Amino acid sequence: DADVTQTPRNRITKTGKRIMLECSQTKGHDRMYWYRQDPGLGLQLIYYSFDVKDINKGEISDGYSVSRQAQAKFSLSLESAIPNQTALYFCATRGRGSTDTQYFGPGTRLTVL
Amino acid sequence: GENVEQHPSTLSVQEGDSAVIKCTYSDSASNYFPWYKQELGKGPQLIIDIRSNVGEKKDQRIAVTLNKTAKHFSLHITETQPEDSAVYFCAAIPNDYKLSFGAGTTVTVRA
């Protein structure tokens, strides 16, 4: 089984709808991240969590919210989706060490019409 | 925060030739520099990394070099093969434990 799983893998929705993307990990890591990927812009950090009670905004948090339901689960929500939130979304996890490997999920392709 | 610049954005090489991707970083406190490979439809996967106390690291056909004084690091792929075609990302991590990524390089290996 994959260490980091994301659901759904693909989602098409309409403007104004609420969307939740889910992430689960079996690595036992405290630190979890949500990234957005757009062509030519690399990976932009949306939110990150260093443990269940510690949630922080990243570079592009406007229009997004997150919930850390447990050490292994970190969800990303779009309260009212808009077309420019169409992108590929990745969840990631890593250990506490500054040089620990960061593991990525397979991604969720979100299209907002 | 850390700012990582990556060049080139696209790279086309003949099979068997070498490919080089270069990155610069801004925060002198950064001490860990991983490289990720992203294949179509998949999430990025770590292929090699280097710590700030090391100048070069090799793993088969892949090598990474680090120049702390100039604040730049590079990925070298020798004897390229079709399966090396992918998007490659460099990253750096300063003391706040968040990776900052470059914009990515799309590598195409021509048969």
Image (cartoon, coloured by chain):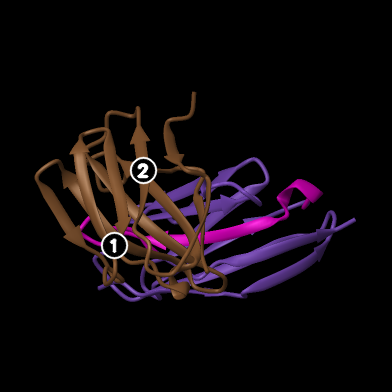
Count residues near mark 2 (Cα–Cα under 10 Å), then give few for <14, some for 14-19, many for 20+. Answer: some
Kindly identify which numbered label has been placed on residue A79.
1
Q: Residue furthest left?
A: A53
- Nearest the eye: B25 or B45: B45
User: Quarter of the image holding residue B98?
Assistant: bottom left
Q: Mark 1 belongs to which subunit?
A: A
Within the magenta stretch, is there residue B99?
Answer: yes
Where is residue B93 drawn, in percent x and y? 31, 59
Which residue type carries mark 2? Glu
Identify the residue at horizontal 49%, vertical 23% (top origin).
Answer: A1
Q: Mark 2 belongs to which subunit?
A: A
Which residue type carries mark 1? Glu
User: Quarter of the image holding residue B26?
Assistant: bottom left
Which residue in the protein does label 2 denote? A22
Q: Residue furthest top?
A: A1
The colour chain B appears in is purple
Magenta region: which residues?
A: B80-100
Identify the residue at horizontal 42%, vertical 62% (top origin).
Answer: A36
The chain shown in brown is which? A
Element type where label 1 sits in the image: loop
Residues at marks 1 and 2 touching, judged by CB atoms closer than 8 Å: no
Element type where label 2 sits in the image: strand
Kindly identify which numbered label has been placed on residue B73.
none
Where is residue B74 drawn, in percent x and y? 54, 64
Where is residue A54 drawn, in percent x and y? 11, 49
Does B32 sit above or below residue B11?
A: above
- Nearest the eye: A70 or A27: A70
Q: In the rendered structure, which disc, 1 or 2, sits on the residue that comes first in sequence?
A: 2
- Nearest the eye: B58 or A54: A54
Does A84 sit above or below residue A95?
A: below
Does A23 sit above or below residue B26?
A: above
The alpha-carbon separation of the residues under discs 1 and 2 comes to 14 Å
